[in-house]
Structure formats: structure tokens, C-alpha cells
Image: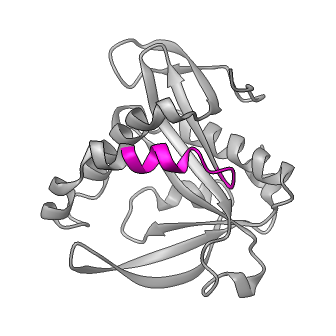
Amino acid sequence: MPSMYAVARQQCFSPFAKVDNMLTVRRAMQNDAREIARVQVETWRVAYVDIVPQAFRDALDVDGRAAKWEEWTRHDDTYTFVAENADGVFGFVSGGALRDGVHVAEKNYDSEIYTLYVAPAAQGRGAGRQLMRALAQHLLEHGLKRPVVWALEENPWCAFYERLGGRRVAQKMIEIGGKQLSDIAFGWDDIGSLLR
């Protein structure tokens, strides 16, 4: 059984039917891959309406994503945590060492939050903050203290990163589904703000 973190138990609304279930944040396991993929695909299809082309969103495949997540959860250098309640997994975060050596490494950022997704029905209720806290604690335990996260500039949840103390530190253009999109890096000079 994976170890639990200090953030493990808190009242939270269910993204499914029940209202008051306990929220648990724990390290992801390989058998969580399908649920992680389901949350990721569901969130992409809702969050990026009018941002990412419809054809790209329609082509997202839970089975294909699940295969990728089975592989990624085996890697010791990628830290993935899930948020779950009695109904199952409804959010996840992953991160590790900095992957972008061009735009932010020169600014001395050493780690990256690769993904953060919470099922649409569960957003705005604290699970994202708890997931970020669990990952930040794990990064700090591995000597990583200055993370960044990349988010599409048009993503309405960019303000979430700013509320957690992240500030815009870089910008790049990326292509998704044939469309050029602005990607913004939010950085934390002190990981401590994510632990509060």
C-alpha cells in the first residue's frame, strides 16, 4: 500500500453522485492508469473547448492514454499522485525534474509540474491545491525547490497557479491539432508557497 501524506484526508465534494466523501491524495500506482487517462481525456474535452481544435479533442483516446500512464507510473523519476474518494480517482498531478532546458532552465528552475487535472465536476473544491501540495512535498524531499508548470495561456485555470504564488516566467508557442497556441510557464522561486 502506498504511503499517505499529511494532506491525505479532508472533506471534499464528490465529482460523481455523492456529496460528502473523504478525499485521499496518494502516490499513483500502475493500476490507476485507466482512471488517470479517463480524467485527463474528460478534462481536455471540457477545458479546451474553443481553445484546442474539436477534431483533436474528439480524437483523444482513453485506451491510448492509459497505456502511456501505465508506462509513466513505472518511472522512478516521474512522481504521480491521485485524488480519490469512495467513487474513485477524480484528479491527478505529476512532476519531476525539469524537462524544458531552453525557456526556464537559465532562470534556475529545477523541476516541473508536468500535469494537473481534476475532473470538471470536482474543480474549484480544493483537490487541485491538495495535489499540488503532495507533489511539492515530494519534490522538496528529492532536493527540488524551484518548480514551473506550463499552461495554455487561454486556459481559464491559469489564475489558479497565480493564486498559489506562481508567476509568469516564460512563454513559448506550441502546436496542438494544427493550431498555434501560446504556452505560459508559471514559476515558484520558493516551493514553500505550495506547501501552505
Give left or right: position of 64 versus 136.
Answer: left
Residue at 74 percent of width and 26 percent of height: 3
Q: Position of residue 152 (x, y in %)?
A: 41, 69
Q: Quadrant of residue 50?
A: bottom left
Residue at 68 percent of width and 55 percent of height: 77
Which residues lie in the magenta part?
A: 67-78
In terms of depth relative to the viewer, which is nearer, 120 or 165? 120
Examine the structure image and report whether residue 26 is included in the region drawn in magenta: no
In terms of depth relative to the viewer, which is nearer, 1 or 128? 1
Query: What kind of colouring is applied to the model shown?
Result: one colour
The answer to whether residue 15 is visible is yes
In terms of depth relative to the viewer, which is nearer, 55 or 170? 55
Give left or right: position of 157 versus 138.
Answer: left
Q: Position of residue 141 (x, y in %)?
A: 85, 49
Give left or right: position of 47 versus 77.
Answer: left
Examine the structure image and report whether residue 76 is included in the region drawn in magenta: yes
Q: Quadrant of the N terminus?
A: top right
Q: Position of residue 73 (x, y in %)?
A: 56, 44
Q: Quadrant of residue 10?
A: top right
Taking 80 as reference, is 160 above or below it?
A: below
Circle count:
0
Residue at 22 percent of width and 72 percent of height: 177
Residue at 61 percent of width and 23 percent of height: 24
Give left or right: position of 69 versus 54.
Answer: right
Q: Quadrant of residue 23?
A: top right
The answer to whether residue 40 is visible is no
Q: Position of residue 63 (x, y in %)?
A: 28, 42
